[in-house]
Amino acid sequence: SAMASGTALLYDEEMTSHKLLWDDPACAIEVPERLLSCYKRLKCYGLLERCVSVPVREATEDEILLIHSKEYLEVVQSTQFMNEEELRKTSQNYDCAFFHPNSYHCAKLAVGATLQLVDSVVSGRLRNGMALVRPPGHHSQRSESNGFCVFNNVAVAAEYAKKKHNLQRILIVDWDIHHGQGIQFAFEEDPSVLYFSWHRYEHQEFWPNLKESNFDTVGKGEGTGFNVNIPWNKTGMGNADYVAAFFHVLLPMAFEFNPELILVSSGYDSGIGDPEGRMHATPDCFSHLTHFLMQLAEGKLCVVLEGGYHLRSLSESVCMTLKTLLGDPVPQLYGEMIPCLSAIESIQNAIAVHAPYWKCFMHDKVSIVQDPSTKRESGDVHLVSQSGSFPEVCADEAKKADMFLQHHMVELLLPVPPLRTAAALASHSLLCGVQVEASTVALEEVETAISNSGMMLVKEEAILLCVGKMLSLLTKILKKQVRNGIALSPAASVSSSVAIKQSIAIGFQKVLCIAIGDVDIGKDFSDDGKTVLLKICGKQNSEMAKSKYCISLCWSEDPHEKDSFVFGVLRFVLPLAYSYQPDIIFITIGAKCSIDVKGISLLACFLQGLAEGRIFAVIQDTEVKIAEAMAEVLTDIRTPYFGSDISSASEAVLAIKRERDRLQNQWKLLRSSVN
Ligand code: X5A
Ligand code: ZN
């Protein structure tokens, strides 16, 4: 079946009419400008016209009653006719809530927009989408308004997707910086909804100060193991901490859960400059989080706005999320990829409490950190203050973030290469859907490049021709005329070896090469940091020199190892690649590749989040099936179905655990436990 295309956007200016009518400092940040500034930014970046505008409707009473009580619905309905004094009185019955005469209408639109989004995506009419809504939803509970939320938009949507579309498994990812306790309470006994939330917690010092927000609340009854909390016990968490939580906790569980739909409770108060969160994630981080989630549920991703109170940070992050949903290249993740100790403790605790319920944690063997670290470590990074580009006169965090974003966004909004994929082929063969690279470089240039690479000079015309086209293509990738490339080569080893050396010569700074199967890239790659070589083969390769820059992983062809390759990608390859931050990636596939086509596709899908999508796949020309799958993955936003299962006998998973232990002090994102 053809995959859905198109990105939905749901927005109705009507939702800006809900506002605070009196003076209340606790609620003053949830303003109509939040929506207006997002919409304005989307327009300014030309993203609006690239989306499919789906009309917003009001949710029906029956839909609201999927989550809320009749009594509470009646209370909210009654606010339509109240005067200011009565509205204030009603608001005071709840923690951090406010009502306006139009709140009921707006809250129905917020739920309705979310349901329209779910309908568009689940039906396959559109691939994915975003709903820009107010009031937010994730704090609201069966019979109460809470934390600026009136109806629980995402919780209603999950229940609706179960009932109306008969879905069995829904993943809710809550990246808002507050705990969506309303969603947790709604589904804590429900194994068909996996709820993940990270949140500022500070050992229960931070609002809403619930002990149920801690990592040891894992769900109850049938739903035990289906509630995942990662409490952050320090402020200042940033890009590295967030991606580490995804690699080591959320994504392994999500692949094992295998959702049919993903709903994101998408608060951007977890971003830089936010007065509530006091965290440091930059807008590009949300591109990466979105990109990761797009690899699940056949790409059925519905992003629904929750919090976010720094207008600039909020709107830039919304734009980055939407750009990624649209399939634009993911920008390089900003900053040093070093998670802080406190974040790793939170990650370790989540793994420890969930290990009994999830096979993906079967080999972790970690326990709860009893004595949490109290002080920051040297590795604890504060992105803004570290970058050093801010005059100290800007005392105020919000202003600092404004200045930072002003400069940072210029680099983020890169021009998109006009051509997505080009193929370097030796003969007249074709690769479905890929434009063939016609130009080549002069023969002398090819020969020079080969001799510079230290490889034996080849004479076969077919190889020389293919290398010539690869070199030509490489320059186009560097100049951003083409995003990625694929080569079908009669000699994958020589070709990729020459191309890697040439990459450095023409100006790439850091080259990651992942070589799978019968590939010999050569031995003279120096440890100068300009290349990292990861070799994956069927049997342990003991000759290969081991260093931080030269890594070998054994992955046997054994069928029961196949479905556990997902975990090798999530917990080893990606942390390694994100720690290194390459600016081009070679995926070299030789004969006797021990990873199946599905595994290779998964790897290539995820790796497109790095190096602004500059992937060069070099495939031995006998491996036709892999070449075809690679072509599909590189030419489109394609998220094939991946099974995942760790068997207890998995040698490979034990092997990655050993390699992680060896390398985690060098490549810091590999670390998922303190010592
Ligand atoms: C949706 C959201 C925050 C409430 C904070 C109350 N609510 N102090 O971000
Ligand atoms: Zn929030």
Image (cartoon, rainbow, N blue to C red):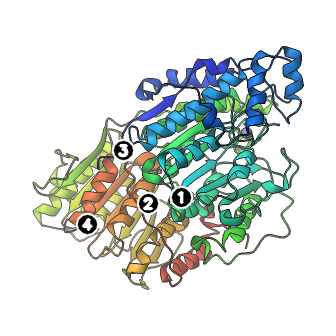
Q: Quadrant of residue 392?
A: top right
The residue beneath circle 4 is 492
> Which badge, 1 or 4, comes first in the chain's sequence?
4
Determine which of the numbered discs, if any, sits on residue 478 in the image. Answer: 3
Label 1, label 4: how many angstroms apart (C-alpha)?
24 Å
Work out whether residue 606 can be spotted.
yes
The residue beneath circle 1 is 580
Residue at 84%, 44% (x, y): give it: 207
Helix, strand or loop status at disc 1: helix
Label 1, label 2: how many angstroms apart (C-alpha)?
8 Å
The residue beneath circle 2 is 512
> Which badge, 1 or 2, comes first in the chain's sequence?
2
Label 2, label 3: how many angstroms apart (C-alpha)?
15 Å
Q: Which amino acid type is shown beneath numbered disc 4? A: Ala
Q: Which is more toward the observer, 28 or 17?
A: 17
* Mark 1 within 8 Å of ligand 2, using the beta carbon: no
> Which badge, 2 or 3, comes first in the chain's sequence?
3
Q: Residues within 10 Å of mark 2 (few under 14, many from 20)?
A: many
> Which badge, 4 or 2, comes first in the chain's sequence?
4
Q: Is residue 571 left or right of residue 82?
A: left
> Which badge, 4 or 3, comes first in the chain's sequence?
3
